[in-house]
Amino acid sequence: MRIVSLVPSQTELLYDLGLGDRVVGITKFCIHPNEWFRSKERIGGTKDADIEKITRLKPDLIIGNKEENTKEDIEALRKIAPVYMSDIFNLADSLEMIAQVAEICNVGKRGAAIVEQIQTNFKTIIPFTDQPKVAYLIWKDPFMGVGSATFIDTVLTDHMGMENVLGNQVRYPELDIENLPELDYLFLSTEPYPFKEKHFSELQKYFPNAKIMLVDGEYFTWYGSRLINAPKYLKGLMERIINN
């Protein structure tokens, strides 16, 4: 089986499923594992796949995601090979995707082991009971945040026990940063926009009473095998909040 992956988190999953010799194409954003990023054929980005290059790779399976990839690309790619499409909103969706991809690639036992480890690790998270209020930013110029019906929202609310002050908005709304609700914490994600600590001072004036924190976006959005280690990161983040 020759596989092309159009989604960074699912590319990493394919690696952890032991499918190295079968994966023939990845996107330019598939940075994990580094050895694949350096050596595998790159087929464009998640939103602008190189259809001709993928055709030349003669894949037997293409793996994509409804949010990450464009409808136009997927329709074109379905003429080349079968396409598996994930649609992830919560942890249950992620675990289902991992199991399905593993079964399709005939490594069901490895997939089941990854699912079990993720489930075990997530059970170790003890959510906040006082529901600190948080806004999670993913973009600048314009500022964009995370609303409901997103994987990030379920991590914040279901697993960390925080109140997403943007939860009354859907998906990834553009924000009037001066008129956000009162909040306790402002999370600046390292991806897709590469927020840095240098952005703290610019935003603090809008939220004088909030603690601004830089958070690793991969642990909030990569819904493949990276979820094995996500609980450790999230618990560390929650400790910092408790000790703040």
Image: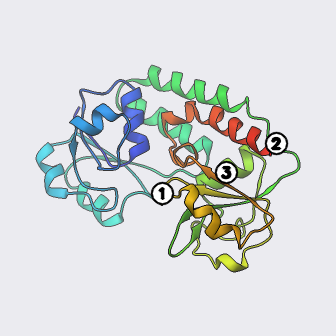
Name which quarter of the figure residue 73 lies in. Answer: bottom left
Q: Nearer the viewer, residue 124 or 140?
A: 140
Can you identify the residue that label 2 sits on? 242
Secondary structure at badge 3 equals: helix
Q: Is residue 167 left or right of residue 150?
A: right
Of tags 3 and 1, which is closer to the observer? 1
Q: CA distance from mark 3 to mark 2?
A: 20 Å
Type of amino acid under label 2: Ile
Please give the name of the residue rendered at 42% of the width and 57% of the height, measured from the top-left corner. 68
Where residue 129 appears, x then y in whole percent? 87, 45
Residue at mark 2 to residue at mark 1: CA–CA distance = 26 Å
Task: Name the image quarter holding residue 25.
Answer: top left
Q: Residues within 10 Å of mark 2 (few under 14, many from 20)?
A: few
Q: Going 39% across and 45% down the picture, which residue do you hit?
A: 8
Residue drawn at x 67%, y 39% is 234
Residue 183 located left or right of residue 45: right
Report the amino acid beneath label 3: Thr
State the residue position of label 3.
154
Residue 218: % across, % down: 51, 45
Q: Residue furthest left?
A: 56
Mark 3 to mark 1 CA distance (whole Å): 22 Å
**Tag on residue 128?**
none
Question: Mark 3: few, some, or many residues within 10 Å (few <14, many ≥20)?
Answer: many
The residue carrying mark 1 is 194
